[in-house]
Amino acid sequence: MSQAMWILIFGDKLSNDRMQSGINVSAGSVNYMGLSDAHYAVNWALGGFSEIRLNKKSLFFAFDFTVKSPLGASNLNNYFPEVIQDTSLLEKQNIVLDNVAFSLPLYLKYKTKHFGLGTGPQLSYIYKSTLRYNAETTSGKDILVKSDAKSYINKFDVGWFAMAEVFLTPNHPKTSLRLGVRYFIGFLEPLKSQSKVNNSNFMLTLGIPIGGKEKKTNKQPEINPEAR
């Protein structure tokens, strides 16, 4: 989380008339495209954003550096060994692959007073991978077993990123909160044992701008000639 804290502390240096920076807090839904029985897993994400104006109109170069970006899926019982072999003792079970990645999309962004749209390539690197075995016995007991899963995955992925957002207070663009959606589809295979599988990540994001000041106009009061 140090990158997000870095933005918070030095936000005034990272936001000016040409550049705007801030923090993104997101809720993510991740899955593996190509595994028909895999289900979405929900997690949260934290990172920052920066955008640099390219012209006097509405075109920007932007990048999001998400330091905690979720990847993975749930309901992977058919792809990983079960912890409890005698399933007659279980009411239900679920194997979840919980990956945490650093992601960096680099994209062009079209921004107006009310909304922004952007798309471009993204690089992701998984630095933490956990296999979670969740089960419930017939007697109502919960079972949770965690193990390191880096040996099952490929750590790098490259794919395509797209985003859309709206400004909650468009009359104050420098300080307006942004509510948006982001989607990433990977091109590389994330699992070593499965082919034709791709990462999929959908996030709802709240963008919080840091630093920057609204322009102030100093209007001179009109003088009534009759008052002289």
Image (cartoon, grey):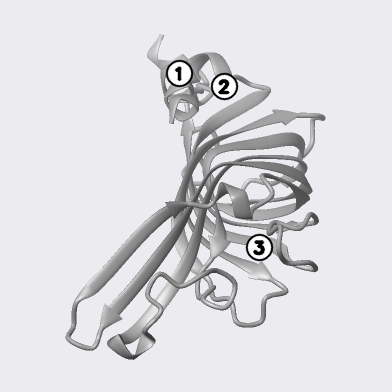
Q: Which residue is depicted at the point 29% across and 87% down?
A: 89
Disc 2 vs disc 1: which is toward the camera?
Answer: 2
Disc 3 vs disc 2: which is toward the camera?
Answer: 3
Packing grade of label 3 (10 A; few <14, some 14-19, many >=20) is: many
Q: Quadrant of the N terminus?
A: top left
Q: Secondary structure at mark 2?
A: loop
Q: Earlier in the sequence, mark 3 or mark 1?
A: 3
Residue named by callout 1: 221
Q: Is residue 123 above or below residue 198?
A: above
Residue named by callout 2: 15
Mark 2 to mark 1 CA distance (whole Å)? 31 Å
Mark 3 to mark 2 CA distance (whole Å)? 31 Å
Q: Give residue 16's quadrant in the image.
A: top right
Q: Secondary structure at mark 3?
A: strand
User: At label 3, which amino acid type do we have?
Assistant: Ser
User: At label 1, which amino acid type do we have?
Assistant: Pro
Q: Nearer the viewer, residue 215 or 146?
A: 146
Packing grade of label 2 (10 A; few <14, some 14-19, many >=20) is: many
Q: Earlier in the sequence, mark 2 or mark 1?
A: 2
Residue 32 horizontal/vertical position (percent): 65, 67
Q: Is residue 17 above or below residue 133?
A: above
Q: Which residue is depicted at the point 53% across and 52% down?
A: 149
Q: Which residue is depicted at the point 48% across and 24% down?
A: 7
Residue 96 horizontal/vertical position (percent): 47, 66
User: At label 2, which amino acid type do we have?
Assistant: Ser
Residue 118 horizontal/vertical position (percent): 73, 49
Packing grade of label 1 (10 A; few <14, some 14-19, many >=20) is: few
Q: Nearer the viewer, residue 10 or 3?
A: 3
Residue named by callout 3: 200
